[in-house]
Image (tube, rainbow, N blue to C red):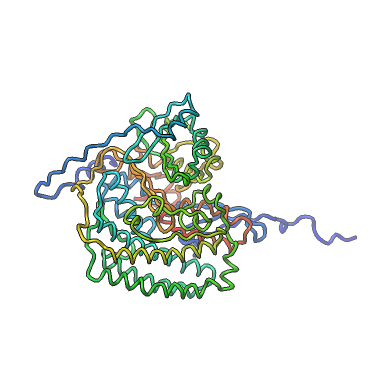
């Protein structure tokens, strides 16, 4: 009897280790993932990060409190306004500075618009990763309208440095309210257009349903926050749980998912954009008059002490832990980046899936490497 | 060099505008107040021999926990007090203190909607237990603390550098590591340039 199959050749190797990134278009920057595969099935992954590490926390210790503010914009550079808000509020808390209501409202409006731009970039690139090219162009069209508001307000589109410790530097420009209202009027229709392209699209459903499932208890264990946590069914949003800026006076809902899969995270973010519009509209409708900056000393010199302040950034909990030694420079600044922590759950989410799903899951976690690596 | 630069910036950057604007007196520094609550009491009751200090500053509560007890205390916080969410884990360097490092845990409880900060003083040659068995999320955070401060966590599943290259020498967030300092040998060998500056 002739042996037809050889007992062992190099083809027998069941496990294969391949490298993805750091130069890979669907890793959204310089993320490198080492994949261990059985055929096309993923047995395990390891993320290699740090390619964009700039030592932001070390820089902070060598700058004054005001000088460090523009640096935070360069971490999550698609949500610079949120980063600035978190930092300014942390320093304000440390110094017990009261921010005037008008500044709080303008901050809230701009931060919510920023949430929309961040989610739009996520939607465009995430859909592109999965093979739908059309939404990207639409998303950038709408994003442009919001970036114009930022540009009119503070001169910058991306790394805005929109806020100052204690309030705002700039008063709103003529036509600010109208422009925000115009976005609020047109955008819901545009969101419906995106949903028409994707929500019931057979390919989209196949690629996202039951992909990258994270159950609620796992999500809490992994410390994930933001839309990823909410899509797993945990109704927790810092804007509601520990309100900051003017969120306490705003009326909005927290969307949650049930299955914790990629599709639910998509639905949660789509609904979040609608809620952000609600907040932005309420903000400009009720925009109080008054000063835009509180009583801030010319030299920012917080008393000895430490605070941890976190906000709900578009990607999750963005925390700043600031230690002051009573001098003009922070003794220690720690940034708790949502992307870094959320990325840690990638391994759990992709085990047992196919390589193509890794791309979908990286997209759905919505990371920005500038924030992961800092 | 690095120190010089720091002094310069400290003196120059926040200078008051010409005309001699007097720096308003800093607000009276609120000292850390002692903190007592049901959380602290139940903790003291369950760990009678352990020296726990609790403080409050700006409405934020913190507990100083000795290094040896961090793992049981962490377990207790998670299972008994329902602080099931570890928001952040980091460290700070105080070279002038007897125990140089402070490892800082930011805990959150969904049930209570409350935050608590745990601080563990650690000496330069000491290590402490990893809390990965309690909160999985501590994995990367402890790796980052190891990477930046060189603090060793016992029984961590995979304690290696995370942001810096594996072969990098030195721990950048220590206070004696200058802002311009770098691992010159690594930079020359791997990037083929004289200096990264």
* Image location (x, y in percent) of residue A56: 36, 49
Is residue A344 toward the left or the right of residue B148 in the image?
right
Is residue A362 toward the left or the right of residue A325 in the image?
right
Q: Is A52 rendered above or below residue B171? A: below
Q: Is B127 rendered above or below residue A35? A: above
| Residue lying furthest left | B19
Observer-nearest residue: A52 or A218? A218
Image quarter of residue A119: bottom left
Image quarter of residue A247: bottom left
* Image location (x, y in percent) of residue A104: 28, 56
* Image location (x, y in percent) of residue A362: 52, 60
Q: In the rendered image, is residue A263 in sight? A: yes
Q: In the rendered image, is residue B168 in sight? A: no
Residue in the image at 36% along x and 52% along y: A243
Is residue B159 toward the left or the right of residue A108 in the image?
right
- Is the N terminus of chain A in the top left, top right, bottom left or bottom right quadrant? bottom right
Observer-nearest residue: A189 or A209? A189
Observer-nearest residue: A364 or A96? A96
Observer-nearest residue: A173 or A43? A173
| Residue lying furthest top | B49
Is residue A267 toward the left or the right of residue A155 in the image?
right
* Image location (x, y in percent) of residue A306: 33, 40
> How many tags in the picture?
0
């Amino acid at each position: 009897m002739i042996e037809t199959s050889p007992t062992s050749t190099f083809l027998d190797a069941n496990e294969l280790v391949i490298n993805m990134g750091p130069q890979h278009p669907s890793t959204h920057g310089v993320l490198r993932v080492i994949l261990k595969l059985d055929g096309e099935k993923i047995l395990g992954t390891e993320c290699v990060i740090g390619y964009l590490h700039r030592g932001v926390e070390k820089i902070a210790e060598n700058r004054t409190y005001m000088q460090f503010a523009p640096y935070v914009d360069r971490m999550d550079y698609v949500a610079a306004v949120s980063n600035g808000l978190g930092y300014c509020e942390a320093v304000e808390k440390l110094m017990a500075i009261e921010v005037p209501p008008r500044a709080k409202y303008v901050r809230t409006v701009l931060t919510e618009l920023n949430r929309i731009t961040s989610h739009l970039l996520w939607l465009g690139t995430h859909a592109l990763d999965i093979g739908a090219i059309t939404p990207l162009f639409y998303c950038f069209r709408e994003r442009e309208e919001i970036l114009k508001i930022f540009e009119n307000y503070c001169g910058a589109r991306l790394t805005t440095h929109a806020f100052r410790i204690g309030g705002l530097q700039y008063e709103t420009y003529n036509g600010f309210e109208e422009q925000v209202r115009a976005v609020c009027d047109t955008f819901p229709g545009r969101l419906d257009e995106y949903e028409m392209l994707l929500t019931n699209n057979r390919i989209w459903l196949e690629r996202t349903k039951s992909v990258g499932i994270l159950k609620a208890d796992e999500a809490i264990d992994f410390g994930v926050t933001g839309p990823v946590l909410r899509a797993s069914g945990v109704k927790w949003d810092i804007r509601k749980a520990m309100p900051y800026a003017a969120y306490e006076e705003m009326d909005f809902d927290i969307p949650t998912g049930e299955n914790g899969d990629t599709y639910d995270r998509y639905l949660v973010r789509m609904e979040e954009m609608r809620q952000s519009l609600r907040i932005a509209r309420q903000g400009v409708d009720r925009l109080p008059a008054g000063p835009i900056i509180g009583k801030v000393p010319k030299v920012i010199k917080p008393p000895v002490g430490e605070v941890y302040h976190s906000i709900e950034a578009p990607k999750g909990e963005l925390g700043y832990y600031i230690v002051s030694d009573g001098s003009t420079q922070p003794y220690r600044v720690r940034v708790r980046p949502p992307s870094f922590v959320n990325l840690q759950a990638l391994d759990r989410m992709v085990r047992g899936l196919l390589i193509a799903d890794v791309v979908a899951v990286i997209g759905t976690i919505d990371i920005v490497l500038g924030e992961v690596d800092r | 060099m690095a120190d010089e630069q720091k002094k310069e910036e400290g003196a120059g950057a926040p200078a008051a505008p010409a005309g001699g604007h007097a720096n308003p007196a800093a607000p009276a520094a609120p000292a850390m107040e002692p903190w007592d609550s049901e959380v602290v009491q139940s903790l003291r009751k369950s760990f009678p021999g352990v020296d726990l200090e609790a403080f409050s500053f700006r409405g934020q509560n913190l507990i100083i926990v000795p290094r040896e007890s961090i793992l049981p205390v962490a377990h207790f916080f998670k299972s008994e007090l329902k602080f099931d969410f570890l928001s952040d884990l980091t460290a700070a360097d105080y070279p002038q203190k007897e125990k140089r490092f402070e490892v800082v845990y930011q805990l959150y409880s969904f049930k209570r909607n409350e935050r608590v900060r745990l601080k563990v003083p650690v000496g330069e040659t000491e290590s402490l237990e990893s809390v990965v068995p309690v909160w999985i999320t501590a994995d990367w955070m402890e790796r980052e603390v190891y990477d930046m401060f060189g603090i060793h966590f016992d029984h961590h599943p995979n304690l290696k550098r995370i942001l810096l290259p594996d072969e990098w020498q030195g721990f950048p967030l220590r206070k004696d590591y200058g802002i311009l300092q770098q691992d010159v040998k690594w930079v020359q060998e791997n990037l083929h340039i004289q200096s990264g500056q």
